[in-house]
Each structure stands twice: as C-alpha cells, then as structure tokens.
Image: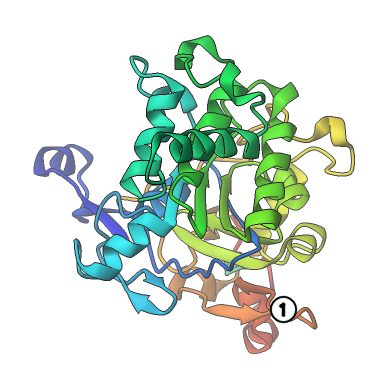
Amino acid sequence: SKHFPVRRKLRDLFNRTHDAVHAVDDVNLILRRGRVTALVGESGSGKSTVARLLAQLYPRTDGDIKLHGLSTRVRGGRQFRRYAARVQMIFQDPFASLNPVHTIRYHLTRSLKIHGNAGTNAEELEAALASLLNRVHLTPPERYLDKFPHELSGGQRQRVAIARALGADPEALLADEPVSMLDVSIRLGVLNLLRDLKERLNLAILYITHDIASARYFADDTMVMYAGRMVEGGDSETVTQSPAHPYTQLLIDSAPDPDRIENLLGDHADRGNGEPPSLINPPSGCRFHPRCPMAMPRCSRELPTRLEIGDQPGHWAACWLYDPATVAAEKPGSAAV
Ligand code: SF4
Ligand code: MG
C-alpha cells in the first residue's frame, strides 16, 4: 500500500476528512520468470505508483516486496541491494531517462560497471557493449555507440533504455507504459523485442498499460486496477475474453477490437465511461460502486474480497457478483444509480 499525506491547506480547501491519498491499497501480485504480467488501468488508477514501489523508488506505506521469498524491507540492506540490481525499470519517456549530454556508450558502460558486468579489460567491455546493442537489435553496434540520445529516434532510444537495463543482467523488468510515447508504427516492434527478450533471457516482465487490447496481445497474465486496488486477475486470454469484473467489462467494451492488428496499440487511451473517483476520500465498499451497473446494496457497505471465478484456475475478481449468497439475497443492479 502507498498513501500520500495531504497537506492541511489542501485538506481544508476540499473539506476532506481524510488525510491521505490512497494511491495504492492492498496490491498483491507475483511476477514469474519467463512471463509477462500486464497491469492495466486508467490514468490515476495507481498503476504507475505500483511500478515505482516495485522499483523501490520510494518506500511503501505498508507491506513487503520479496525477491525469491526474501524480504527487502531493510532499505540499503543486503537483500534490498540485490533486488535493486536484479529488478530494472524502463520508463515511459526514453528521452527523459537518458542524459542528453552523454553518449550511448557512456550510458551502457555505466550500467555494466555499476553491476560488475563490464569485464576486466577494454576488449571485454567493448564486447559487452556490442552484445547489449545486438540484443536490442541496434546493429551494427558501432553505428550507435558514440551517438547522443537526440541523434536517435524515439524507438531507438527506448531500445537503448532496454539495453541499459539489460546491462544489470536482471531477472525482472518493470516497464511503465514503455511504448505509449512512441509512434504507433513502431510500438509493436518494441513490444515484440521485449517478448523476445523474455523468452531468451527468461525474464519476468511487468507491463504497465492503459491499453487492455495490447495486454491481450503481449502479456501472459493480466491484472486490472481500479482506483488504487486490484479488481481482477488471471491469464490474459481468460481476463480479456471472459472478463468477470464489471469494470474490466467496461474497459473491454471501450477498447477497439483486439483481433484486428491495425487496432492494436493505437491512441485510444482512457475511454472508460465516467470519471475515476478521488483517492483522497475513496468510495466506501467497492470503489467501483458509483459507476457499476450491477451494484447491489452490499457493494457500498463492504469491500469485496477476491473470489475465484468458474472453472478457470487462477482467475479471480474482487466483486460481490461472484458470491452466490449475496446474489441470492440482493438482486444485481438493484443499487445501481
Ligand atoms: Fe463492485 Fe458490486 Fe459492481 Fe461488483 S457488483 S463491481 S462489488 S459495485
Ligand atoms: Mg502512469
């Protein structure tokens, strides 16, 4: 969980009784090597906060992040440092994440050196640099090494950012909207590269996106976030073909047809109906209840727990519709506004 304190002035201004923004609450997920896990949600759903928490860019309010089952709770401790090396982040804007006054050689050398992968002499370093650029298909490497970030296209810069992450020899990549700032025509190429690296290097990849159609195309597992909480999860095929949570259904209904490849990865962001709620004073019970066409009286009273769906192992939704006793006692939609 991550709560940001609200300054007193702002609190008085909005006449709020709560003193924190509940950016992320009770998020629980497992990344596995050799799998891409998509975290899908509208802007403001907390998905980027999850990425920054997992990158340990700031401390969490509550909870733990483990690597191979071992806690990283002690900041600066041995397991924390190990995690920082093994889990690398790729940012949305490759231009902002690369220093404009330094060459590609500088960026990649620095990553290799920090993580002890630069070899013991100049030849080994040169070979390691070439291998990084080959891995992200920037070939021949000598054409790119001495260029500055502004001399490359957006897609090439993102490939350099990926190469820099690989310089750490990571086990996991955290990719926060890695293609949304790139031209539509090159997005697929970068996602295919990430998928290829997942296979070849047995990486765990967290793919954060507002685009559920691309999650189906690219991710093995899909988790959906709404208003700081995870509302549904399962394998991507199941979640996108048979969405269980009313919010996931809304996302899918407002996304273009994922079977048409030309619709994939276009600029069709954030087209859910209505506004996501304020996270300063989130709705009671299920946070989706003010927008949910299936809402029942219990939904505004009680936070739904994760419930297993049907016969698909690992498919769950946090929704009272999957609690037979609730559905029998309270008609679905009876409390919808
Ligand atoms: Fe939330 Fe109730 Fe709608 Fe399920 S049915 S999404 S619990 S409001
Ligand atoms: Mg974001």
Expressed as whole percent of the image width and height from the top left, the position of residue 322 reads 67, 79
Q: In which quarter of the image is residue 111?
A: top left
Ligand 1 picture quarter: bottom right
Determine the residue positioned at 62% across, 56% down.
201
Classify 329 as above or below 147. below
SS category of the residue bearing label 1: loop
The kind of residue on which mark 1 rests is Ile
In the displayed structure image, the side of residue 158 where residue 303 appears, left or right: left
Residue assigned mark 1? 309
Quarter containing the C terminus: bottom right
Classify 176 as above or below 222. above
Using the image as rendered, state which of residue 153 and residue 29 is in the foreground: 153
The reply to whether residue 229 is visible in this rendering is: yes
Expressed as whole percent of the image width and height from the top left, the position of residue 81 reads 28, 61
In the displayed structure image, the side of residue 120 where residue 76 appears, left or right: left
Quarter containing the N terminus: bottom left
Determine the residue positioned at 61% across, 80% down.
307
Classify 147 as above or below 161. above
